[in-house]
Image: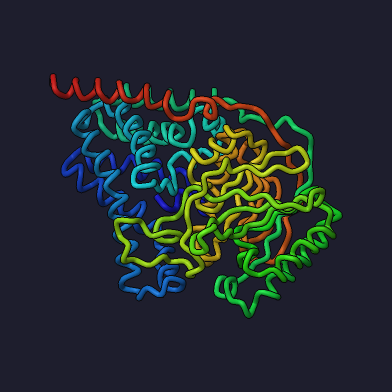
Amino acid sequence: MPYAFSPFDHQWLAILALAGWLYLFTRSHAGLCGLAFGFGWFGFGAWWLVETFHTYGDVPYPFAILAVALVGAALACFPALLAWLCFRIAGSGSWLLLVFPAAIVGMEWLRGWLFTGLPWTSLGNLLLDTPAVGWAAYTGVYGAAILPALLAAALYLLSQRQSYLPALAGLGCAALLIFLAPSPFEANGEKQRVALVQANIPQDQKWDAAFLNETMQRYATASDQASGKSDIIIWPEAAVPFFPSRMPNWNRWLNDQMQVWQLPVIFGGIKLLDDGRQAHNGLYLFDPQTKARSFAGKQHLVPFGEYVPEWVPFLQALVPNIADFRPARDAGLLSALGVRYGSLVCYEAIFPEQARARVAAGADVLVNVTNDAWYGKTTAAWQHLQSARMRAVETGRYLLRAANTGVSAIIAPNGDMTATVPWFTEDVVYGEFRASDVITPYQRWGNWPLMALLLPLLLSGWQRSGRA
């Protein structure tokens, strides 16, 4: 399953894997097969977390491996429940053609919000770079999982000699979904130029005061060069690694630099709250016309990374001890030159609900800033990018992605990257984008219509199994 997602992008592997999983769990021990399959998908698929825990969390390797194994085991409970439910309702028969895709969508939705949610490597992301990607603007990423699940169920039924007819019907429906897929939405605003600064600051230097001057000069130099080529400049998450209120000299230098460029600058930073202990992680926007800054804070924080859940107060956060982060309650919008930018800070880009909320608040464009240097040169950055691309399709918005070490990119509403630079290089992404006020069906209705259709299907299947 991990090889089906970016950067490998072998989507067909997911269909074969799902079909093989169906073959196994319809024969015996459905729940155990679900646990094993889920552990492979989410446990081995997140191996990159081991190095992160060890290198930046000072967790010994054995405990880092154990932590990732526990995460994989917890997430594996979702496929275990799905397998048990499907076998309970449909057994090994042709009813799986309807029940399996419905259960897959329910599983994806459930793991997207339960216990704060972790929809990493969502199955619907596999529709990117395919003719069927337009469906995501109608169903969202969770509903988009129907197509690969339907293909997998049809392939499984083909292996059952008595199920050729329903298998062919399933393949025919999948072919129709691909052939009749709607086109992605297009942005309808005026073209504007943007510069996304990828400064490539090593993670072990990012919060080190000894490297602060070098860090800020790197951003300033890149922005000097970009000022004549763009209408707005965007820096990545926590590009400014200090509290402006605590470092007035650096804060003044920052304002002077940005005033010279005479452009709006969006930059990642941290904001100290009134109590002097807690903080917001988020985005600042400097407006050269008013010389003022606005701020949009991160709303969906990373458990154990940016805060310690109240039920485990004895654990320490895995980021440097800058502050105890708290979720922001603002609308997540920043405005400049008549354009409203919806803020998605790092982890928020994997949640479709976060992007929907920004657009509902009035965002014309989405801005995703991140620092994936935590994960080194692993698959994590590419899987993160894949999720961000799906947010553009779902909302019909351009998404401007500035990442410290990459992958920085301008992403069009069809999910394509119109401009990017290699990761782990110091560079600037130049390109154009359009604001948009289009409202996609998914933006308007969210996940609820799909859930309303799938729940009766599962319930009718359950009743059928009871009568059988």
Identify the residue at horizontal 30%, vertical 54% (top origin): 39
Q: Decide which of 152, 55 is in the foreground and name it.
A: 55
Identify the residue at horizontal 68%, vertical 71% (top origin): 215
Vertical placement of residue 30 versus 346, above or below:
above
Q: Quadrant of residue 102?
A: top left
In the displayed structure image, the side of residue 108 where residue 260 appears, left or right? right
Tell which residue pokes out farthest to the front in this image: 275
Looking at the rendered image, the quarter that the C terminus falls into is top left
Can residue 401 be seen in this snapshot? yes
Q: Decide which of 345, 245 is in the foreground and name it.
A: 245
In the displayed structure image, the side of residue 302 where residue 419 appears, left or right? right
Can residue 155 be seen in this snapshot? no
In the displayed structure image, the side of residue 368 where residue 169 appears, left or right? left
**Residue 37: percent from left, percent from top:** 29, 49
Q: How many marks?
A: 0
**Residue 188: percent from left, percent from top:** 72, 30
**Residue 169: percent from left, percent from top:** 37, 22
Q: Decide which of 202, 91 is in the foreground and name it.
A: 202
Vertical placement of residue 233 versus 450, above or below:
below
In the displayed structure image, the side of residue 159 where residue 324 appears, left or right? right
**Residue 82: percent from left, percent from top:** 27, 38
Tell which residue pokes out farthest to the bottom in this image: 210
What's the coloring here? rainbow
Identify the residue at horizontal 47%, vertical 48% (top origin): 300
Vertical placement of residue 284 versus 373, above or below:
above
Identify the residue at horizontal 63%, vertical 64% (top origin): 245
Q: Quadrant of residue 184?
A: top right
